[in-house]
Amino acid sequence: NNSDSRVANARRATGEAARALAAAAALGSTGGSLGAALANGKVPGSIPALVRLADARPKPSGGSTRAVPARYATAAAASLAAAAGASPEFAGKLLRLDALDVMRDALADDATSPARASAALSSLVALVSRLCDPSGPDGDPRDLGGLGDLGRTLNRMASTGGTEGTEGRDRGELAERDVGAPTPAGVLAESGLVAACAVALDPARPGVVAARARLENFDDDADAADADADVDADAFDRDVAATTRHAARLLHLPFTHPLPAAGTAAAARAEEALRRYQEQLLAEAVVAGLVQAIDGLRGDDLAAPAQLLSQLVLRSSQCARQFLEAGGLDEGLVRGLLAPQNPAAVLVDSLLAVSQLARLSQRHYPAIARAGVCDGVGRLLTHDDPGVRARTCNLLGNMCRHSGYFYERIARHGVLNSLIARCEDVDRTTRKFACFAIGNAGFHSDALYPELRVAVPPLVRLLGDEEDKTRANAAAALGNLVRNSAALCGDLIRAGALERLVELATGPEAEA
């Protein structure tokens, strides 16, 4: 009994020390110092000890099975995440200690709380980034033997020169063994991390439900050493948001990693890994998980998930379908994504996703209409950020691409005046997309011609714009304004459109 008591007390002391480190790391400026303190060798075995503490999986001990108390495992994971995020060298050391497997298994456990899931994901972003960095200072990144099953798989793929899945190619072309660091797509596809992220994103998984229940049924007298986090509603909300944010950052890494030179064995390997990775994203319904997870997020917390969702919807019609089926165009969600006070990056990515749906098919128009998109785009047309203004014009153009479904709604919401004003925007991309949108607003019928009358003079001026595509869009828009009736012919003549169109059609560029 005395021995068990000493072990329990020692474990508690270790765990509380880890919690203190995690609290310091949470301040945001101590990650580098923490990594240096752990790596300087003054406390031998400190890094492996923290990795063991972060591993909450039950382990055999003296004939019985013991698990690290969840609170201490979470604190250790948070400390390691802060240090790894601040120091690639420290992340490299963690890779040799199976930390990637430890963090992945924490995610894959649906009983993991938001606090632990967030810490594990933050660590994984740093670990995968380090593993895929070919210029790391802590040794040859191709020496993957310390990574267990994942390392053996990646080494096998490297040893084949990327020929797995490339049957039929010229062996001479693939004989060159360009063995470099693995790619994020390869790591995520081979490590089970896609499935683990899908589990972590589920807002109804047991770990989230249990953490929420602790908030509602907190007992001040209980010893919470086996609970996964302090009972704090604000902390719970932060952890849920951080879980979504870090999961999106991790899953987005394959789309930002530089690709090897085309035609090399490394390029073949990277292409195959990216294909497998995207198949897994679809199979695990990651888009649906992200849509559920972002409901209720605001501001900066939306940046990473909105970026990933936009990337996936733009890349794949299947992902676009998952987005729709999961409620990606529900009115409340769209209102939150397109709120003018959101960061510009969130607005741009959200506009890109909705615009892509509009571009893909007019079958999506009713869902876009029900989402109330026309209600908010007028304010975004006058946003301070030129990227937001440009993508709003592009969205309106795609909403008028296939039919006149939105014509009446656009007129009713008073959008056209703000859209026409964008023809004289200081931003060249905004001017280009404004012409595109106005042209489509006049293509299917003359219903909007009365409101579009004032667009004629600025469109004529844009026939002399510095950008070729803008001049082409302006010319096409003017043609569409006389396509369906003669109502605006006099306006085009008075604005000098005919002469400018002749100049454009017969000028030096026509001979190029």
Image: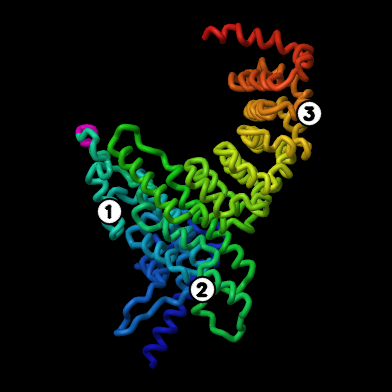
- 375 to 214, vertically: above or below: above
Q: Residue at x 49, y 47 (%)?
A: 319
Could you tell me if the residues under marks 1 and 3 are in contact, i.e. CB atoms within 8 Å? Answer: no
Camera-side mark, 1 or 2: 1
Within 10 angstroms of label 1, few (less than 14), some, or many (20 or more) residues? Answer: some
Magenta residue span: 172-176
Is the magenta region chiefly helix, strand or loop? helix
Labelled disc at residue 153: 1
Q: Please, what secondary structure does the residue beneath circle 2 have?
A: loop
Q: Residue 219 appears in which quarter of the rendering?
A: bottom right
**Residue 264 screen position, x and y as percent:** 29, 34
Q: Which residue carries the number 3 mark?
A: 451
Spot occupied by residue 496 in the image (x, y as percentages of width and height): 75, 11
- Of residues 169 and 189, the one drawn nearer to the viewer in this rendering: 169
Inter-mark Cα distance, 1 to 3: 63 Å
SS class, disc 3: helix
Which mark, residue 228? Answer: 2
SS for tag 1? Answer: helix
Left or right, residue 494 beside residue 241: right
Q: Residue furthest bottom?
A: 1
Q: Is residue 167 above or below residue 221?
A: above
Inspect the image, locate mark 3, and give the three-letter code of the amino acid beneath it: Glu
Q: As drawn, is 132 to the left or to the right of 292? A: left
Which amino acid type is shown beneath numbered disc 1? Answer: Thr
